[in-house]
Amino acid sequence: MKIAVLSDIHGNLEALRACLAHAAREGADLHVFLGDLVGYGADPVACLGLLADHAGRGALLVRGNHDEAALGGLCENMNDDAREAAYWTRSRLSTAERDFLAALPLTVRRDRLFFVHAGADAPEKWNYITSKVQAGRCMDASPTAVTFAGHVHHQSLYFSAGSVRVFQPVPGVPIPLSPRQRWLAIAGSVGQPRDGNNAAAYALYDEEERMLTYFRVPYDHMTAARKIIVAGLPARLAWRLQRGK
């Protein structure tokens, strides 16, 4: 089975549709969405509608910190732009959409794979995995040898072979995941990449072949940016889509 892993959509409908279309062409059999479905972008309702349809067809979803922020609270740990976007998103969601987000778990296990938005060691704390030490804690806490996470808006791959090492994947190049090692795949962001490349990011895992491939997918980022401006959201959020950082 080929599993498309998409994270940090952030209400970006154009990017989400582009990645789903790309994953379909790659033969994806199952979709997993690693949280932060909303926040920042101007299309939270449309994105949640699309994701709910996929959930009804068997897709797996977990909750992210921006999804939680959209449900309530003061969002005091967020920066000004993120907080404003969270309040704006919150005001657009219906009861049904809020219930959908509230029902999402923090983690999901599927056979030999584990899915989480942030770190597996403390998923509710929304810690960023930006070092080998943090990646090691996540892998140690995971109940499986292969873990997928999001939260960090760039793609990377960590593995443990006595010590923790990090590998920078090349888009489109399959990576064999040896069963003798533990792996942590950071999927990147569909809706707000931050590595200087404005193309949407996701990953595809072939369970049978144990092959992981990262992808970058160009999309109509200018339309997504214009929607942010029209909605009255912070202009910096539109700028980030254009610059990819």
Image: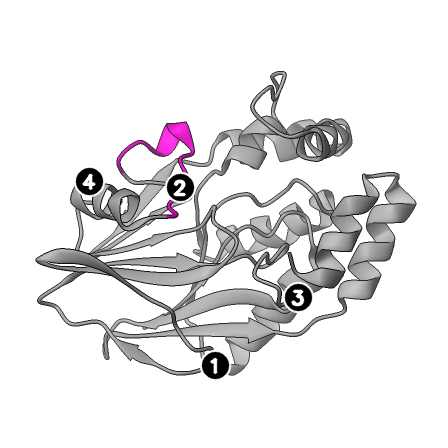
Circle 1 residue: 26
**Distance between the alpha carbons at the discs numbered 1 and 2:** 26 Å
**Distance between the alpha carbons at the discs numbered 2 and 4:** 12 Å
- Identity of the amino acid at label 1? Glu
Residue 112 horizontal/vertical position (percent): 19, 57
Side of 34 where 45 appears, left or right: right
Chain-order first, disc 4 or disc 1: 1
Chain-order first, disc 3 or disc 4: 4
Q: Is residue 34 above or below residue 158?
A: above
Q: Residue at coordinates 72% horizontally, 47% vertically from top-left?
A: 41
Q: Residue furthest right?
A: 230
**Distance between the alpha carbons at the discs numbered 2 and 3:** 22 Å
**Distance between the alpha carbons at the discs numbered 3 and 4:** 32 Å
Q: Secondary structure at mark 4?
A: helix
SS majority, magenta: loop
Tag in front: 1 or 3: 3
- Identity of the amino acid at label 4? Ala
Query: How many dots with numbers?
Result: 4
Circle 3 residue: 198
| Magenta-tinted stretch | 121-130
Residue 1 horizontal/vertical position (percent): 32, 73
Chain-order first, disc 1 or disc 3: 1
Q: Nearer the viewer, residue 79 or 113?
A: 79
